[in-house]
Every structure is written in structure tokens, then in C-alpha cells.
Image (cartoon, rainbow, N blue to C red):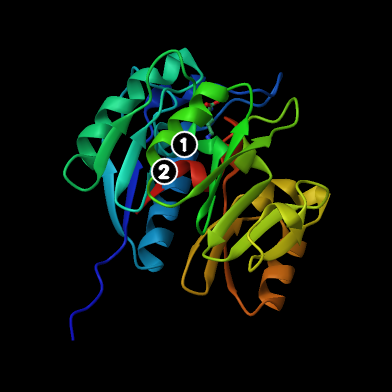
Amino acid sequence: MIAPPQRRALVRAIPDSYAVALGQVIGAPAIDVARARAQHVAYRAALEGLGFAVTALPADEALPDCCFVEDVAIVAAGHGLLTRPGATSRRAEVEAVAEALRGAVVLHRTRAPARLDGGDVLRVDDAIFVGQSGRSDGAGLAAVREVFEPLGFAVRPAPVAAGTLHLKCHVSSPLPGLVLAAEGAYSDAMFPASTRVVRVPAAEAYAANAVGAGETVLIAAGYPETATRLRAEGLTVVSLDTSELALADGSLTCLSLLF
Ligand code: CIR
């Protein structure tokens, strides 16, 4: 029997300049870059533990936020849409990821003046939601439609609350058919009918951003009720320290492209 192809994960190392990565929290403590790197290493190991073949791109000191590779491409069904990040300081992150994806997927580009961050793009089976945030606009939504609707995906806009960076800050789909969402954020009816929606208490909203494979979900450490609710669904939960990633508004999905 021929084994199915191993799923791949693309990540990018953390530069020293991560100390000045973009962040919304005024007066946040300084980022400890060495600690951020240790958390990134643990994340990569956790992805390998889930069975992903991990490719790590080198960091670029000119791009403090370059570890957040999720924002620069949307990959699904053998196609990759390179984004045009909403933050101008992040636009040049796209090229190294484009190079890494070339040959692995059919590549498309988001054209100016559209703005699109992958953190605003949530795939739930054959539905794709595109958050309308401070980073992603209607033209970004149109770019996603142009590539993914012909492939059979239903592409829809989703609101993002003011002050929230991305759609996936409060909702994610760590496994096929499973959505993890903060209480009060988005109604169950928004997702395909067969979706199992697990709610995270509002006080643990950060933990709604999760990654997984098989029957295992990686969540941010320090969110016990989220872990309990996922275990109650029969899932295995692995908690990862994300403290230094959170200081730059990062969470677990942001750090990889899975395909
Ligand atoms: C930024 O502000 O763009 C980065 N400091 C954080 C990006 C996090 N990405 C994500 O949630 N997909």
C-alpha cells in the first residue's frame, strides 16, 4: 500500500529584530528574544510530533515579524495565494515564502491595492471566511474569491471587532470539522452544518487560536478550561508556552503554513 504524502509545515526563524516586532499593547513588557526562540523551537518540535515534515526558513533581520508566516500566504487544495499584508513593514516577507512554496503548490498573487493577512483567513472544510479587519479589506476578500471559489470553496466575509488584530484571534479550526471559538464570538450557524463547535470561555479567548492534526490539538499554555473542554471531546491536548509570541500579538496558527 502506498502511504499518503506527509503533510508539510513551513515556519520561519525569529530574528534579533523581533524585539521591535509590531504590537498593539501599549506599555507591554519588552520581548525576550531568546525566550521567543525557545518557544519557537518547542512549537516546531510539537508540529513534528503531530507528524508534519517541518521546513524552517532563515530569519531576515530586516523583517522583525517574519516568523508569522501564516500572514503571507493562504494554502489550500494545492494552490497558494501570496498575500499583500496590511502592514507595509511586512510586505517584503512574502518573497521568501513564495520561493519556498514554488513547485509545491500553484502560486497566485494578491494585487495592489488589496490588503490581506492570512491571520484573517479561516478555512473550515470547504468554507473560507475572510475577516474584514484593520489588515484585510474587501479587495483582499475578492482576491481569495478569485483563487478559491473556482476550486469549490465557499468564500465569505466575516466581521472582526474593532481592536482585534485578526479574525483568527478568537476563532480557529485546528482539525477538519472542528472549530474552536471564544464564547460570544461568531454564531455556530456561520459554519458548515456538520461542524463541531467547541467554545472557549471569554476569559480564555486567546486560546481559541489552535493548531492540530489527527486527534491532537496544540493550545497556548495557561488556559485550563479550554484544555478541559477539548479533552471532553476525546481530543489530546498539548499546551505550549507562547508568552513572547503573544507580546507581538502572535499565537499558534500565525507561526506556520500547513499544507
Ligand atoms: C503583526 O502585528 O502583524 C505581528 N506582530 C503579529 C501577527 C500575528 N499573526 C497572526 O495572528 N496571524
Question: Disc 2 vs disc 1: Cβ atoms closer than 8 Å?
Answer: yes
x, y percentage for residue 196? 67, 68
**Relative horizontal placement of residue 176, taking residue 15 as reference (left or right):** right
Which residue is label 2 attached to? 148
Q: Which mark is residue 145?
A: 1
**Relative horizontal placement of residue 137, taking residue 197 as reference (left or right):** left
Q: At 57% from the left edge and 56% from the top edge, which residue is drawn? A: 173
- Tell me the SS state at disc 1: helix
Q: At 43% from the left edge and 61% from the top edge, which residue is drawn? A: 46
The amino acid sitting under disc 1 is: Arg
Instruction: Let me know if residue 110 appears in the view.
Output: yes
- Tell me the SS state at disc 2: helix
Q: Is mark 2 within 8 Å of ligand 1?
A: no
Q: Quadrant of residue 84?
A: top left
Instruction: Let me know if residue 222 appears in the view.
Output: no
x, y percentage for residue 230? 67, 69
Q: Quadrant of the N terminus?
A: bottom left
